[in-house]
Image: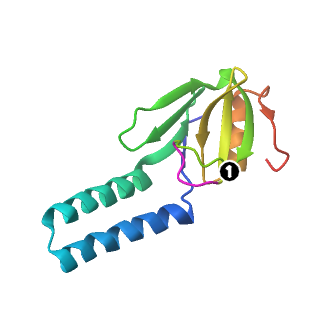
Amino acid sequence: MVDRVFKSKIGWWYHLTVWVMAISTVLIFVKTNSVGGMVILLLMTLFLIHGMLTTWYKVTADGWLIAHSSFFPEKRVRIEEITAVEVTVMPISSYALSLDRLIIYKNGMQWMLISPENKQEFVKLLRRHNPEIRIKDPIL
C-alpha cells in the first residue's frame, strides 16, 4: 500500500467568495484609489486561493490520516483510532472547503470535519486500514 492524497472538494460558496474578494480588490482600488484597502483585500484573496491549492487529506501506508489546510497546523490521527465516519453539511470552521463533508470520529468523539473529493473511495481506503470503522450514513 502507498500513501494516497485526496484533495478537498471545493464548494460553490468558496469559489464565489474568492471571486467577490478579487472583484472587490479591483473595485476598491479603481473607485477609491485606496492602496491600503486594495492590499488588504488582495492578501485575503491570495490566502483563500492558497487554501484552495493546499487543502488535502493523506492516508499513509503506515496507517495515519493527515489533514492539511493552508498555513494551519496539520492534524494527524492513527486510522486505528477512527471509530466512525458520517456525512454532514455542518457549516462550522474546519479543514474543509465544501459543505459536502465527512465527520471523522476518533475514540467515539467528533475529531474533525473534512471534505475529500471522492468520499466513497476515501472511506473505502480508511476501512482497508481499519475494518472496524462504523459508517453512520448508508450513502457511503
Residue plotted at (73% across, 49% down): 120
Q: Using the image as rendered, state which of residue 76 and residue 92 is in the foreground.
A: 92
Q: Residue furthest right?
A: 138
Task: Write down the quadrant of residue 11 in the picture.
Answer: bottom right
> Which amino acid type is shown beneath numbered disc 1?
Val
Q: Residue furthest front?
A: 32
> Quadrant of the image for the N terminus?
top right
For residue 73, say whether it is visible: yes
- Tell me the residue that label 1 is attached to: 89
For residue 62, say whether it is visible: no
Where disc 1 sits, the SS reads: loop
Residue plotted at (65% across, 47% down): 90
Q: Is residue 140 left or right of residue 118?
A: right
Residue plotted at (77% across, 29% down): 133
Q: Residue furthest bottom?
A: 31
Q: Is residue 52 left or right of residue 24?
A: right
User: What range is drawn magenta here?
Assistant: 95-99
Task: Where is residue 6? Give x, y as percent.
Answer: 56, 47
Task: Where is residue 117? Give x, y as percent.
Answer: 61, 54
Residue plotted at (16% across, 61% down): 36
Task: Where is residue 63? Give x, y as percent.
Answer: 60, 26
Q: Using the image as rendered, state which of residue 105 and residue 39 is in the foreground.
A: 39
Residue 37 sits above or below residue 82 on the image: below
Task: Where is residue 4? Give x, y as percent.
Answer: 56, 41
Q: Is residue 110 left or right of residue 52?
A: right
